[in-house]
Image (cartoon, grey):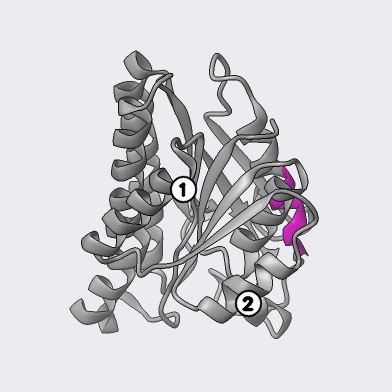
Amino acid sequence: MTGQVAIVTGAGSGIGRAASLNLLAAGWSVVLVGRRPDALEETAGMAKGGQTLIVPTDVTDPAQVDALFAKAKATYGRLDTLFNNAGGNVPSTNFGDFTFEMWRQVCAINLDAMFLCANAAFRAMRDQTPQGGRIINNGSISAHNPRPGSVGYTSTKHAITGLTKSISLDGRQFDICCGQVDIGNAATPMTARSTNGQMQPNGQMMVEARMDADLVGKQVAFMASLPLEANVQFVTIMATKMPWVGRG
């Protein structure tokens, strides 16, 4: 896959960093995207192979997203994969106390930004020669089952499943694939609270198992490596012992 080009959002830490490093190790050129230039520089400094382009971007801003994709095209001439990864959340809050401001904050990064980046990537892949490419959306096991107090996060991750399916259908005529990776308890800054316990549906706090984020990075790199005639539509990768399957 040497010579292929990927854009990874949220590349400064966690899953985005793990995916970027695995793609780079496989010889990809990777556009590292995030709000913090220092974090992106740190990711680039950890690379073992490939080529990096750092483009600090607020992916909730349409103008900045347009500038990002223009920079990637000007530098590399084409785009083969977007890992649409950037996301966020607010503290766990019971639905009755969840404010519209909190709702908009979560929707802006988890849904609006995912649409903006996927939309720009789709156009780039449709309009390049040869046509085609792959969009990988970061979902969550919350795209299937909610946690208590997570209405914003859960609703947006359910919406990402609809986004993934719609892109998959509309992209067929242009050789554009779209898949989704649903992640459960990768060891990242976002899941650090799991080490102190997570609220369970029965109202109890419980420490939950986590897994190495690099395993998710490897999964993303595998999905990206497939020829466009094949697609991993949905995949769940999760900590084996986390309380999700069945009743715990």
Which element type, helix, strand or loop, lies under badge 1? helix
- Image-quadrant location for residue 127: top left
Q: Amino acid at mark 2?
A: Pro
Vertical position of residue 83 compared to residue 232: above or below: below
Within the magenta stretch, is there residue 108? no
Q: Position of residue 165 (x, y in %)?
A: 37, 31
Of residues 133 and 237, which is closer to you in this image? 133
Which class describes the residues within 10 Å of circle 1: few (<14), some (14-19), or many (20+)? few
Q: Position of residue 103 (x, y in %)?
A: 26, 72
Q: Position of residue 21 (x, y in %)?
A: 71, 55
Q: Is residue 168 left or right of residue 102?
A: right
Quarter of the rendering occupied by the N terminus: top right
Vertical position of residue 243 compared to residue 199: above or below: above
Dominant secondary structure, magenta: helix
Quarter of the rendering occupied by the C terminus: bottom right
Q: Is residue 158 left or right of residue 226?
A: left
Task: Report the residue at 29% width, 64% height from top.
Answer: 64
How far apart in space, not on screen, are marks 2 and 1 (Cα)? 31 Å
Q: Disc 1 designates what residue?
A: 75
Which class describes the residues within 10 Å of circle 2: few (<14), some (14-19), or many (20+)? few
Q: Amino acid at mark 1?
A: Thr
Res 106 seen here: yes
Q: Disc 2 designates what residue?
A: 189
Magenta range: 211-218
Task: Report the residue at 70% width, 35% height from top.
Answer: 222
Q: Is residue 219 left or right of residue 169?
A: right
Task: Report the residue at 55% width, 24% height from top.
Answer: 231
Of residues 154 and 180, which is closer to you in this image? 180
